[in-house]
C-alpha cells in the first residue's frame, strides 16, 4: 500500500501563488508517475500535471506557463508551485501516484487539499 498526504492549500487572491506538497510513503516502486489532479464543485476530476520518476513532466493546458511540478525521489515528495492563480483554479487538489506491479496499474490518491482563489 501507498499513502499520500497533501499540504499547502489555502485561500489566496487572484494573481497570487501557492505551493502544494505531497508526501508519499509505503511500498513505492522505483519506477512510477506522480501527479496532481483537481476537482472543482460540480465538475469531474481533471489532470493538472504529472511527472515520471526520471523527471519527465506533462502539463494540462490551463497549467502551462503558470504551474511547475517537481519531485524529490530521495524523499518521496511531490510539489506543485502555482503562480498567477486565477479564480478558475479553485478546486480540491489531489496527489496521485501510479505504478505498475505484476502487470497491474495501481493508482493511489491523497485526501485532497482545498485551493481557493478569490477575485
Image: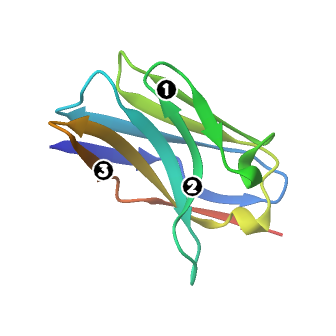
Which residue does the image show at 81% across and 39% down from the upper left?
65
User: Compared with residue 72, is residue 117 higher up or lower down, i.e. above or below?
Assistant: below
Q: Nearer the viewer, mark 2 or mark 1?
A: 2
Residue at the bottom extreme of this rendering: 42
Which residue does the image show at 84% across and 70% down from the upper left?
119
Q: Position of residue 106 (x, y in %)?
A: 25, 47
* Cα–Cα span, label 1 and label 3: 17 Å
Q: Position of residue 22 (x, y in %)?
A: 42, 40
Q: Nearer the viewer, mark 1 or mark 3?
A: 3
Which residue does the image show at 53% across and 21% down from the upper left?
55
Q: Earlier in the sequence, mark 1 or mark 3?
A: 1
* 38 or 105, nearer to the observer: 105
Q: Position of residue 80 (x, y in %)?
A: 59, 39
Q: Of helix, strand and loop, which one carries label 1?
A: strand
User: Compared with residue 54, is residue 69 higher up or lower down, i.e. above or below?
Assistant: below
Q: Position of residue 27 (x, y in %)?
A: 16, 32
Q: Are marks 2 and 3 in contact (CB under 8 Å)?
A: no
Residue 77, located in which quarter of the rendered image? top left
Q: Which residue is mark 2?
A: 47
Residue count near mark 2 (Cα–Cα under 10 Å), binned few <14, some 14–19, many ≥20: some
User: Compared with residue 58, is residue 15 higher up or lower down, i.e. above or below?
Assistant: below
Residue at the front extreme of this rendering: 103
Q: Which residue is mark 1?
A: 71
- The disc placed on residue 107 is 3
Image position of 119 (left or right of 112): right
Q: Of helix, strand and loop, which one carries label 2?
A: strand
Q: Are marks 1 and 3 in contact (CB under 8 Å)?
A: no
Q: Of helix, strand and loop, which one carries label 3?
A: strand
Amino acid at each position: 500500500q501507498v499513502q499520500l498526504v497533501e499540504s499547502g492549500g489555502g485561500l489566496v487572491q487572484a494573481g497570487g501563488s501557492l505551493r502544494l506538497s505531497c508526501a508519499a510513503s509505503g511500498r513505492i516502486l522505483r519506477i512510477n508517475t506522480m501527479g496532481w489532479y483537481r476537482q472543482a464543485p460540480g465538475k469531474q476530476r481533471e489532470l493538472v500535471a504529472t511527472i515520471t520518476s526520471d523527471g519527465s513532466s506533462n502539463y494540462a493546458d490551463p497549467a502551462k506557463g503558470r504551474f511547475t511540478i517537481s519531485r524529490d525521489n530521495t524523499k518521496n515528495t511531490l510539489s506543485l508551485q502555482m503562480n498567477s492563480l486565477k479564480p478558475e483554479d479553485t478546486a480540491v487538489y489531489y496527489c496521485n501516484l501510479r505504478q505498475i506491479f505484476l502487470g497491474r496499474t495501481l493508482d493511489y490518491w491523497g485526501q485532497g487539499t482545498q485551493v481557493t482563489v478569490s477575485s
